[in-house]
């Protein structure tokens, strides 16, 4: 029953997160907020809402291992599973991708997060440092987006706006207000409900099987919250959009480290299990470094590499559970 409730909580979270993104995006567009601002803020935060609610609820429920494990496990899964499985099926060709700037920022966010973990428990000042890093990242992405738009000045303003709106997740300029409000209400109700169900059932599972909440966070919760990224990346790999696949993973990892733990640290103290300091944080960092040849040297991520990443993730899970 606990596993069924955990699955139910996860499904509610994913559906509510999608509803919130759709409602927030279309509210912003109807109010005249530029699509560029929406994509850099509302969509980015909205897609991370399930992970955020899980971590905040875990802190309030005195289960800090789930809060940290959710982020560390998700970041590891994003590289090894979310990229590995699609590469194993389809393969990626990254010769035309240019994700170097955001990749270096992801490595910097990873290093900052690991360093702060050695000054645990994570408290409000750790959260402020992480959120300051998030502000720097968002500002840099905003400037890059503006520069990219200026470089495409040959397009008409109307064509640029249309393209930007079409690129937004869940955007529908013709959506009626009643439908927008319905999505917002479903999202705002479903997110805390799903997070509460998932945290309670995950804690019960941990107690029943005699494992720590950290292990549950690193495995069950982390894999579950990485499923949307996996679906997006599989779709991108099928369409030969390697830049979307890499950008999805790199962006998700940065938000996990800076926004989710940053906000959760403001809610309450987060103890860091010594096991994280000895092993899991370094696995996360190592997985991030594994992306370097594909991002910096434009190596192709073929089926062999996809199989290797997937096997590495399976081995990591085996070590964590064991």
Image (cartoon, rainbow, N blue to C red):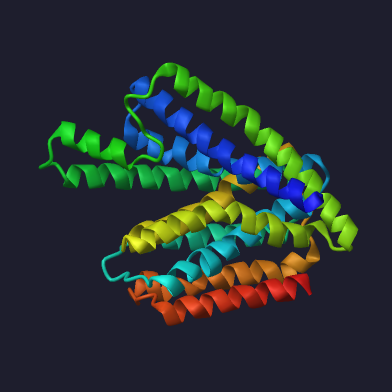
Q: Is residue 219 above or below residue 49?
A: below
* Foreground of the two, 163 or 153: 163
Tell me which corner region of the image, top left, top right, bottom left or bottom right, holds residue 92.
bottom left
Q: Residue furthest top?
A: 178
Residue at the image point whose x is 76% and y is 58% from the top:
216
Locate residue 33 relative to residue 86 in the image: left or right: left
Q: Is residue 215 above or below residue 16?
A: below
Q: Residue furthest left?
A: 154
Residue at the image point whose x is 37% and y is 24% from the top:
175
Label total for image: 0
Q: Position of residue 247 (x, y in %)?
A: 40, 56
Q: Position of residue 288 (x, y in %)?
A: 52, 68
Locate residue 163 relative to residue 317 in the image: left or right: left
Tell me which corner region of the image, top left, top right, bottom left or bottom right, holds residue 77.
bottom right
Locate residue 137 relative to residue 281 in the image: left or right: left
* Foreground of the two, 145 or 94: 94
Residue 267 showing in the rendered view? yes
Residue at the image point whose x is 89% and y is 63% from the top:
210
Q: Position of residue 173 (x, y in %)?
A: 32, 27
Q: Position of residue 135 (x, y in %)?
A: 49, 42
Tell me which corner region of the image, top left, top right, bottom left or bottom right, holds residue 86.
bottom left
Q: Is residue 196 above or below residue 209?
A: above
Residue 102 showing in the rendered view? no
Q: Identify the image quadrant of the C terminus.
A: bottom right
Locate residue 149 relative to residue 18 in the image: left or right: left
């Amino acid at each position: 029953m606990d596993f069924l409730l955990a699955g139910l909580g996860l499904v509610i979270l994913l559906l509510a997160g999608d509803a919130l993104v759709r409602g927030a995006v279309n509210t912003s567009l109807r109010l005249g907020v530029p699509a560029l601002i929406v994509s850099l803020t509302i969509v980015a935060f909205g897609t991370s809402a399930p992970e955020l609610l899980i971590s905040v609820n875990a802190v309030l429920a005195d289960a800090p291992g789930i809060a940290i494990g959710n982020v560390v496990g998700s970041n590891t899964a994003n590289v090894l599973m979310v990229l590995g499985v699609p590469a194993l099926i389809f393969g990626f060709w990254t010769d035309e991708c240019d994700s170097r700037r955001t990749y270096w920022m992801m490595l910097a966010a990873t290093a900052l997060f690991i360093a702060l973990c050695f000054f645990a428990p994570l408290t409000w000042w750790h959260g402020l440092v992480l959120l300051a890093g998030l502000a720097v990242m968002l500002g840099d992405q905003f400037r890059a987006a503006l520069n990219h738009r200026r470089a495409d000045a040959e397009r008409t303003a109307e064509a640029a706006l249309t393209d930007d709106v079409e690129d937004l997740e869940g955007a529908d300029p013709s959506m009626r207000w009643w439908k927008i409000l319905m999505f917002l209400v479903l999202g705002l109700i479903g997110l805390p409900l799903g997070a509460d169900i998932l945290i309670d059932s995950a804690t019960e599972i941990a107690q029943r099987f005699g494992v720590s909440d950290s292990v549950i966070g690193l495995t069950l919760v982390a894999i579950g919250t990485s499923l949307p990224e996996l679906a997006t990346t599989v779709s991108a790999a099928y369409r030969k959009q390697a830049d979307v696949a890499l950008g999805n993973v790199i962006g998700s990892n940065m938000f996990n480290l800076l926004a989710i733990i940053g906000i959760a640290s403001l809610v309450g103290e987060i103890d860091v299990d010594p096991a994280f300091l000895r092993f899991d944080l370094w696995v996360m960092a190592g997985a991030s470094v594994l992306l370097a040849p594909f991002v910096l040297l434009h190596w192709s991520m073929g089926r062999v590499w996809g199989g290797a990443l997937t096997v590495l993730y399976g081995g990591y899970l085996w070590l964590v559970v064991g």
